[in-house]
Image: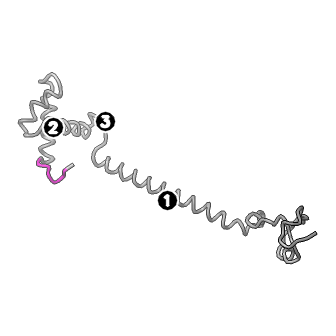
Amino acid sequence: MNKGLNKFSSEVRERAARLVQEHRGEYPSLWAAIESIAPKIGCVPQTLSDWVKRYEVYSGQREGLSSSERKHLKALQREVKELRRANDILKTASAFFDLAGSTADSRIEGLHRPTPRHLWGRADLQRFADYPTVLQASRSPTTRPGAGV
């Protein structure tokens, strides 16, 4: 929409729409009235039709949103979109920090530190002395390099 090229003032548009409304009964249809009045104003019939529709919305004869209501609705829709995006970011961050903080939680202490399946020597036992571990013997003596039976 070219706002700078609009050669009709709002008063002219409103007066033209009222003129169509006043002379509507003299013509078989609304479009016939618009086609008759548009050349007198100096605009094309489609433009005058748009003005008439807008005038009917403002006067309450037709359902719809005025331009100020439409601007307000668009601003609210933008705000909702931004808030939803921020909500998604916060949910993701919350989930991340919940997982990061869960290692300090005493109820699920072993969640991020799995106990080893096989312990090979005393050094391994000392490192995992704080954790309850089930010691298992290795089934295959060749699983550890240099191990012999």
Q: Secondary structure at mark 2?
A: helix
Q: Which residue is mark 1?
A: 86
Viewer-nearest residue: 75 or 136: 136
Q: Is residue 3 magenta?
A: yes
Q: Are marks 2 and 1 in contact (CB under 8 Å)?
A: no
Which circle's residue, 3 or 1, is located before the other in the chain? 3
Q: Tell me the distance, in whole angstroms, between the alpha carbons under discs 2 and 1.
A: 44 Å
Query: What range of the chain is rendered magenta?
Result: 2-7
Q: Position of residue 81 (x, y in %)?
A: 44, 53
> Could you say which disc has been placed on residue 63 in the image?
3
The three-letter code of the residue at mark 2 reads Leu
Viewer-nearest residue: 41 or 15: 41
Which circle's residue, 2 or 1, is located before the other in the chain? 2
Q: Is residue 71 magenta?
A: no
Q: Which residue is mark 2?
A: 48
Q: Quadrant of residue 36?
A: top left
Q: Quadrant of residue 118?
A: bottom right
Q: Position of residue 115 (x, y in %)?
A: 81, 66
Q: Secondary structure at mark 3?
A: loop
Q: Tell me the distance, in whole angstroms, between the alpha carbons under discs 3 and 1.
A: 34 Å
Q: Main secondary structure of the magenta part?
A: loop
| In this rendering, the label closer to the viewer, 3 or 2 | 2
